[in-house]
Image (spheres, rainbow, N blue to C red):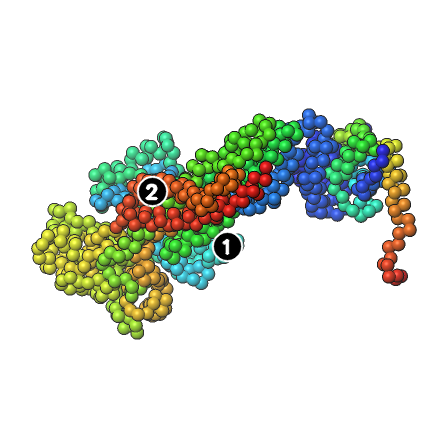
Amino acid sequence: MTEPPASPPPRPPAWSERLLGLLVPPDIRVSLQEDLRERFATLAGEEGLARARRWYLRQVLSAARPTTLWTLRVRAGGPASRWGRARWIGDAVQDVAHALRRTRKAPGAAMAAVVMLGIGVGGGTGVYAIHRAIQDLTGGAGLPDPGRIRVAAVRDSMGRWRTELPARAAAQLLEAAPPGRASAVSVRPRLLRVAGTVQLRAVAAVTPDHFAVMGARVALGRGIGAEDVGTPVVVLSHDVWRNQLESDPGALGAVVHLDRQPYTVVGVAAENFRDLGFVSAWVPLDVRAVGGAEDAGPPAPAPSTPPVTLVVGPVGERDPVLSGFVSRVGAILGQDPGPVGRAARAGRAGLVSIRELTSTGERRSIQAVFGILGALSLLVLVAASANVANLGTAQILARRRELALRRSLGASRGRVVRLVVTELLCLGLLAGVGAAAVVAGLTRLIPLWLPPSTANVVDFRVEIGHLWIAVALSVVASLLSAAFPALRTPATAEVLRGGPGSSRGEGPGRIQRGLVVLQVATSVLLLASAGLLLRSTTFLRSLDQGLVPDRSSVFTLAFPEPLYGPDDVDAFLRTTLPDLGTLPGVDAAAAVAPTPVISGVGTRVGRGFDEVGVAARRLSVSEGYFQAVGTELVMGRAVRRAAPDEAVVTADLAERLWPGGARLGRPVVIDGRTVRIVGVAESGVYGTGSVQPHVFLPLDPDRTDALAVVIRGSAGPGTLLAAVRSAVRELDPDIPVNSLGTLDDLLDRAQVLRRAASGLASLLGSLAFVIAVVGLYAHFSHHVASQRRAMGIRLALGAPRQRVLRETLLRGLALTAVGIGLGGALALAAGRFLRSLLFGVTPSDPGVLGSVTVFLLVTAAGALLAPARSAASVEPMVVLRED
Amino acid sequence: MGDTLSEFEQMVLLALLRREGEAYGASLHEEIHRSTGRDVAVPAIYVTLGRLREKGFVSARQEAGTTVRGGRGRKLFVLEDAGREALARTRVFLERLWADVDLRPAGGGP
C-alpha cells in the first residue's frame, strides 16, 4: 500500500542539479544526486530553504574542484568506456592545470602574448564600438533596425529631402496608410521643466502608434497610446530620466512641465532611442483634430500649425500591405497647395529611409573613414597575432625535448596537440581580459579628442557585447595565430611523428620573417595615414576663415513658440543686446541666426527671377555682426535692422554674380524676393576646405525663434555666460541660454571627423608601432638564440665580433626596409580612400612618408641593438661545450 | 596490506561502522556532521568511498527502489574485513605515536 505524500519535499534548484549532472560521471550521478536531495530536504526543514540552497551550491562546487573531478572521472570512474560522453572534462582539467603551470613558468612570454593580443583585439573592438556610436548618431535614431523605417518626404529645388509636411497633408497620409503602420510626429523645441531645472528640449508630439511603428521600446511604463489623446501625459527620454530624475524607478506618475503646463509621466523610452532628432519627451498628438497638428495637452494657444513628419514602418523587402500605400504617397501630397504639393506633382515625393535623411555626404565620409580605420585595426590585430605566432613557435621549439619525451612515453599525437592548444586558449582568455581593458580605456579616451558638444551627444559607453566580442576574438586570434604556425614548424612536425625532436639549431623560418615585415608595413601605413590627416587639419586651420575667431564667444538663446513671439525677440534685440555690448571687457555684441560656421541655411542667390543662381549659405544678422565675428567689409556697409531689403554678400559670391563689375546697389533675388546689395564682406572657408559663399540679411524677429549671440572681447565664455544669463533673466527668467564656447571651438567642431579619424589613426599607429618594435626584437632574439652554435663556430674560426654585430643589425634593418617599402605602397593605395579628408597634402607627401621611414628605421635599429650585441658576445668555448 | 588511512578515510570508515547496514552517502554525511560538526562535501565522500573500494576496504550494493527516493534505491556501503584491519592498524599506529607524548609547553606550566 502506498502512502499519499502530504507535500513533496523541497528540491534543490533545477539548474544546480543539472550542473552537478554535468560534472559527475553517470555511474554515481543518480546515487549522489539522491543523497544530496535527501540531505537538502533535511537541511531545508531544519535551517530553512535559503541556507539549504547555499549548502547545495557549495556541494556542487566541491564536485567541480579539479582534484575531486579528477578522482571522480578518471580514477574512480574506471575504464574509459564508463566515463561516458563527458570524459573530456577530466582531460581538459588536466590540460588547463598543465597550461597554467607552463604560463607560470614562462611569465614573460605569456605576458608579452597577452599584451600583444590585448592591444590588437582591444584596438579593433574599440574602433568598432566608436564606429557604431557615430553611425548610430548620424542616422540610427537609436533604433534596433533603422533601415526599415521610412519617412514621407519631398525633394526641394536644392535636391535635399524635406520631411516636414503641412499638418493637413500628413493627416491625409495617415488616413490612407494601413492601420497601425504609420504615425505622425511633430518635433519642436519646448521648455521642459523637470525636477526644478528648465531646459529647451526637442519634444515630439506623436500619434498613438508611433512607438510601435518606430520599433522603439520603453524602459519604464508605456509609450503614447490611443487612450492618451487629449490628456496631458508625457513619456520621457532615457537621458532625461537618468540625468534629471536620477533613474528614479518611481518616476511614473511624477509631474513635469512643458511650456509651463503640467504633464504626468507615464513612461520612459528605452536607452538611446532619440526618434527624429534627439527627442527628450513625447506627448500625444491628434493630427486629425482641427485639420492640423496640435498637441492634445491642456489648451495652449498655437499661433501657427507646426509641420508634421509622417513615419511608416517597419517596412520589409516585399510588403504587399504597404506597397499600395507607397504608390499613393505622391498623389496624396500632390493635393497640397503649397511647395510640398508642387514638389509632389513634379514627381519629387516618396518614402525615404531614415538613414538617407542625414546629410549623405557626411555619412559617407564617416563610413569611409571608419571603414578604413576598421580595416587598419584588423591589420593591427594581424600584426599582434603575428607576434604571438612568433612567440608561440619559439616556445614550442624550446620545448621540443619535453614534447618528444611525452610522445615516446605514449602520449598520442592528438594529446600533444591538445596540450599546446589548451595553453594557447588560456593565453587567449587572459588576452581577452587585456583587450577588454583596452576597449574600456579607448572609449573613455576618444571623447577627449572630440569637442565637448559632440562628446556629450555621442554615447561612447562600453557595451558588454563588445567586451565579449573582444574576448572571443582574442581566443580565436591566439589559436589561429599561434597554434597552426607552431604546429607546422619542421621540428614540431618531427616531434608529432614520434621522432626524437632534433636539438639542432633552427632559426625562425620564412613565415616568421614575413610576419615581421607585415608588422612593420602595418605601422607604416597607420602612421602615414595619421600624419596625412594631421597635416590636413593644420592646413585647414591655416586658411583664411573669413572671421577672426580667437576673441569671440558664442551663446545660443531660444524663444520657443507658443510661449514667446516676435515681440520677445524684438525686445531682446532692441534692449538686451545693446546692454551686452556695454559690459566691461566687451568690444561688440551681435545676434545671428542660425549659428555661423556650424550651421547655415542653404539658399540660391541670383541676379533675376529667371536665374537658377549661385548656391550660398544665408545668415540673418543684427547690426554689429561683422565687428563681433571679426569679418572685414571690403566695400559698402553692414545691413540695418529696419531695412529688410538690404543684403551683404561675400566677395567670392559678388565676383561670381558680377565678374569684375560694380556690386553695390545691385539687386539680387534670394528666396523669391529682391534685395539690394549694400556691402561686400571678405571671403572665408568657415572651417571647411573651400571658400563658402555667404549672404547676410537683416535679422527679422517675425521669422526667428532661436538666436546665436556673438560677443567679442577680452572676457572668456565662462565669465560672459553669467553676464548674458543675468541680462536675459531681466527680460524673462525662462529663456534658456547656453554657451557654445568660442568661435575657435566652432571651427574645431567643423573638423570633428578629421580630428577623430586622425586621433584614432595616431592611436592605432602607435599601437602598431609598439607591436612592430617588439616583434623585431623578439624575432631577432629568437634568431640569435637559435644561431648561437653557428655564431660560436664562426667566432672560434676567427670572425671579428664587430662583423657579427654588423651583420645581425643589417639583417634586421633589411627586413625593416622591406616592411617600410610594403607599408609605403599600402599607404599610397589607402590614400585614395582618404583623399576626401585630405587638404593641402597629397597621399604621396614626401615629408610625411620620409619622416615615418626615418622614425621607424631609427627605432628598429634601437630594438635590434640588444640581440645584435648578444650575438657578438657569444663565447665560442661555452657554446661548443653545450652539446 | 600495509596501508594506513588518511584522516578523511578514517572518518568515512568510522561513520560507516557506526551506521552499519544503513550506510549510504546521505547517512554518512549526516553521521560525520553529527559526530564531528564538520560539514564535509558529499562528492568528497564519494571520491573517498571510490578509493576505498579500489583498495578492497569497502564494498557496495544497490538497494531495491523505495517510494522515499523517487523510486530509486540507495547505494549501500559495507565495511570489508580488509577495511576493518586497516582501521585497526591505523589506530595502533596512532596510539603508538601518541604514547608518552606531552602536549604541554617544554617550560612546564599547568
Nearer the observer, A7 or A854: A854
Q: Residue drawn at (42%, 41%), measured in percent from left and top? A: A811
Image location of residue A184, percent across then percent down: 35, 45
Residue at the spot x=64%, y=37% of the render? A93
Q: Quadrant of residue A629?
A: bottom left
Q: Work out which residue is located at the far top of the displayed protein and give it.
A: A81
Against B16, residue A838 (above or below) is: below
Q: Residue A772, how many percent across, how many down?
A: 43, 45
Instruction: Report the front residue among A57 and A40.
Output: A57
Label 2 vs label 1: CA separation? 52 Å
| Quadrant where the N terminus of chain A is found in the figure | top right
Q: Secondary structure at mark 2?
A: helix
Which residue shows up at 72% across the image and 32% down it? A75
Which residue matches tag 2? A824
Q: How many marks?
A: 2
Q: Which residue is mark 1?
A: A247
Residue A171 placed where, x, y %? 32, 43
Q: Of the residues shown, which amino acid type is indicated by label 2?
A: Gly
Q: Residues within 10 Å of mark 2 (few under 14, many from 20)?
A: many
Of tags 2 and 1, the one toward the viewer is 2
